[in-house]
Image (cartoon, rainbow, N blue to C red):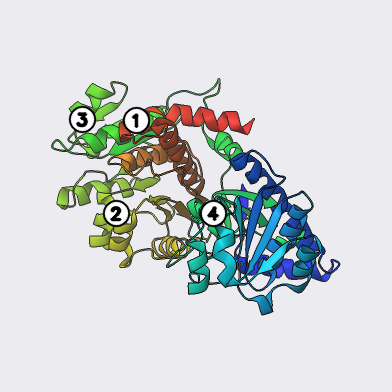
Amino acid sequence: MRGIWTTDHVRAAEARLLAATPEGALMRRAAYGVSVRAAELLAEHTGAVVGRRVVLLVGAGNNGGDALWAGAFLRRRGVGVTAVLLKPEKAHPAGLAALTRAGGRAVAPEQGPQWIAKADLVIDGIVGISAKGPLRADAAELVAQVDAPVLAVDLPSGVEPDTGWVEGPAVQATATVTFGAHKPVHVLNPERCGDVTLVDIGLGGELGEADLLQLDPADVAAAWPLPGPADNKYTQGVTGVAAGSSAYPGAAVLAAAAAVRATSGMVRYAGHAADVVRWHWPEVVATGSIFDAGRVQAWVVGPGIGTGRDGKDVLAHALGQGVPVCADADAITLIAQHPDVLDARDPETPLVLTPHDGEFERLTGARPGADRVSAARAAARRFDAVVLLKGHTTIVAHPDGRALVNAARGSWLATAGSGDVLSGLTGSLLASGLDPWLAAGVAADVHSRAGQLAAGGVPVSASGVLAAVPDAVRQARSLAR
């Protein structure tokens, strides 16, 4: 798993490393990494490096120093470099001296527009990870005039580093170079960061335990259940699905089909859409009621069951069976309206809640807000459940504080029914015996991959996402090799 550290932890680790490192050495190492990535972007966007023009947007402090040193390195490669000093009196002295020695120029903010207009690449060194809030007016005015690709130093200026939140003017980066560790902004708002390159500055031994985690393909491949020679349909996991209705059978079909696509050993469907589910997926064992559905190793309950008494009875029955439950959609609304329904649950039985923002508000009384990770963690503690907070970036929080982040692969999953597919995937992994926190994280990863593969650059339906699930698993396994 990839570790992600908050800015407080990164700054503390940097302070320890700086105390044992010659002055300026870490900055030069970081800046060299910026210069290498800048040269790559120049070659990619213009076909050359020598003779191209780079503008540095330089704020006060070390972030500006990184940009100035990077400019000095680029000058040595034959690049024309102009630094626009937003606070000339506070520019990093050593970095500015290095740039001017190398033949670069430094100009005042009012001269910035004429140089920005000629730039082949702009390097954003306005603020670093200590900054909060949007760009100030002078910086925002300059950034608004940029048409060239932008390389951000550590993070796009104006984006909140620990939440990825944008509440005003901010840089839109083509790419970002970060140092020592990935920060939350890189996975919580990947669109603002662009392609992120991590430069090793020797920080690893100082960081300690990660604050957030992100699954890599090897994690997904290792966790995804595959049948062995001694397996049968029961040992691979029997997934129960209580979803849909006779009037709205789509949720039932999609959730049950996702469990089938996720290679459950057996899928049992229980509900009023039994005939429709059976017609679409004859391998599903379908019955009209959860009360005579037979034994399962996990339940998916909620999509399309309604929020009346019948739906509440279905949810209570699933919670009382002593097996893991993935509660989605109407089940979440029922829990919000009737908290006592959770009394049917054995406290030792795993529960996964999968709300989108609106359901999260019904469940907790407030929308997730800017700090989605903290909101998901608080809800996980409150309900003693794994909370999979759906959104452009998905958060999976455990009651003990562990949190997984699944960075978005586009917006292809913003379509009706895609949540039903995710529920079916999650339920299938729960039935296989996977740890509920990991099961939710792996399901979110495969779901996201399937959306990207199915879309191929154009909008896609939930049925298309469903069809791409096996390809998504194969992709993860291939990348893990």
- Whole-percent x, y for residue 119 in the image: 59, 54
Q: Which mark is residue 173?
A: 4
Which label sits in the foreground, 1 or 3?
A: 1
Reading the chain from its start, which is encountered first: label 4 or label 3? 4
Sequence-earlier tag: 2 or 1 = 2
Neighbor class of circle 2 (other Cα within 10 Å; few <14, some 14-19, many 20+) is many
How packed mark 4 is, by other alpha carbons closer than 10 Å (few <14, some 14-19, many 20 or more), is many
Q: Residue furthest right?
A: 22
Residue 464 image label: 1
Decide: marks 1, 3 in contact (CB < 8 A)? no
Q: Which residue is mark 3?
A: 274
Image coordinates for residue 84, horizontal then vertical, percent: 63, 67
> Does residue 163 lie above or below 440 as drawn?
below
The C terminus sits in image quarter: top right
Q: Earlier in the sequence, mark 3 or mark 2?
A: 3
Q: Which mark is residue 332?
A: 2
The picture places residue 53, in percent across and down from the top left corner, at 65, 52
Q: Secondary structure at mark 4?
A: loop
As drawn, 249 above or below 68: above
The foreground one among 466 and 333 is: 466
Nearest to viewer (mark 2 / mark 4): 4
CB under 8 Å between callouts 2 and 1? no
Of mark 2 and mark 4, the one earlier in the sequence is 4
Circle nearer the viewer, 3 or 2: 2
